[in-house]
């Protein structure tokens, strides 16, 4: 039987502990296997959360809650959106996506301090939560990219931002959003408004009529991804290898600029 989210969280916690022990003991041969198991468990947890979001209708807010207020904490609302997008995103896109897909309003100003709160929580008690809303890292200096939020359970290279990454992530988000909306049957006027920036900024995505065509947007985005995706992947993976020399906290939230440069150029 498929593992429950609680079981997955417990396995993730155990794997993280075993990975830290292996690194501390110098058991390098075990590290790749443990990382692969951890990555698979984290992806399973993300998928389970997304399935629960899709299959369970959001409850109506109680009468005591102001209209438009969500029952979920801000970090969980952001996690919902980032799980759908699958890429690091700026607050503006996160808020717009949440408004189109989920119940309750997400206030952009609350996102400003979220990453700092998550970092303080991680440094106080590392890995005490199943996930953290963390930073995307610049590929050159491995510092936090201002204004971009990601999820800690994603593979490290997925949180790296190289020269081509903003465009690749834009195209990836377009494909994932359309497919999510098609799966949930929520391709209505509000959702289509969310997709217009993608349609207007991807060559070949808009048709000869004003009617939105999901398949055209997906095809246009995938066609351009074929041009950039491989080079971007190589750049991200190379940067991720350097980033693994940083501390756990710095891998999630970025290091100080000069310290990060020195640490990845030693040896």
Image (spheres, grey):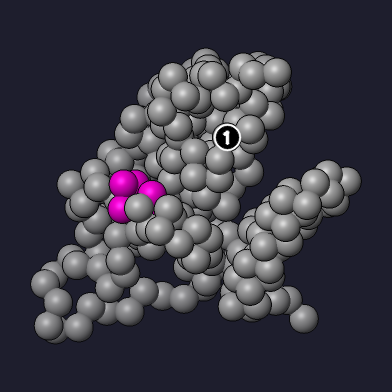
Q: Residue at x 73, y 76 (%)?
A: 2
Q: Residue at x 35, y 53 (%)?
A: 120
Task: Using a 10 Å C-alpha cutoff, classify the residue at mark 1 as few (fewer than 14 neighbours), some (14 to 19) or many (20 or more).
Answer: some
The residue at the far front in this view is 25
Give the residues in magenta: 115-119
Can you give x and y, in whole percent of width and height, for residue 241 in the image? 68, 29
Q: Which residue is mark 1?
A: 246
Element at badge 1?
Answer: loop
Q: Is residue 31 left or right of residue 122?
A: right
Can you give x and y, in whole percent of width and height, for residue 146 in the image? 34, 30
Label the magenta part by its dominant secondary structure.
helix
Nearest the camera: 103 or 15?
A: 15
The residue at the far right in this view is 29
Answer whether residue 207 is visible to the viewer in this image: no
Nearest the camera: 249 or 228?
A: 249
Q: Is residue 125 above or below residue 5?
A: above
């Amino acid at each position: 039987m498929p593992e429950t989210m609680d079981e997955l969280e417990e396995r993730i916690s155990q794997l993280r502990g075993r990975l830290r022990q292996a690194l501390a003991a110098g058991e390098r041969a075990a590290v790749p296997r443990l990382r692969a198991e951890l990555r698979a468990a984290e992806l399973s947890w993300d998928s389970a959360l997304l399935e629960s979001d899709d299959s369970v209708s959001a409850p109506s807010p109680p009468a005591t809650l102001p209209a438009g207020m969500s029952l979920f904490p801000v970090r969980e609302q952001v996690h919902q959106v980032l799980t759908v997008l699958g890429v690091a995103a700026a607050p503006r896109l996160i808020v717009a996506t949440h408004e189109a897909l989920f119940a309750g309003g997400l206030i952009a100003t609350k996102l400003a301090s979220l990453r700092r709160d998550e970092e303080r929580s991680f440094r106080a008690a590392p890995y005490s939560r199943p996930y953290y809303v963390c930073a995307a890292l610049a590929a050159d200096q491995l510092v936090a990219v201002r204004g971009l939020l990601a999820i800690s359970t994603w593979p490290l290279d997925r949180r790296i931002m190289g020269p081509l990454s903003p465009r690749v992530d834009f195209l990836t988000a377009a494909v994932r959003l359309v497919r999510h909306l098609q799966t949930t049957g929520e391709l209505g006027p509000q959702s289509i408004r969310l997709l217009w920036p993608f349609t207007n900024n991807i060559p070949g995505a808009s048709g000869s009529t004003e009617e939105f065509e999901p398949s055209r947007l997906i095809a246009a985005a995938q066609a351009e991804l074929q041009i950039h995706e491989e080079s971007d992947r190589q750049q991200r993976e190379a940067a991720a290898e350097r980033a693994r020399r940083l501390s756990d906290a710095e891998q999630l939230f970025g290091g100080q600029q000069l310290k990060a440069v020195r640490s990845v150029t030693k040896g």
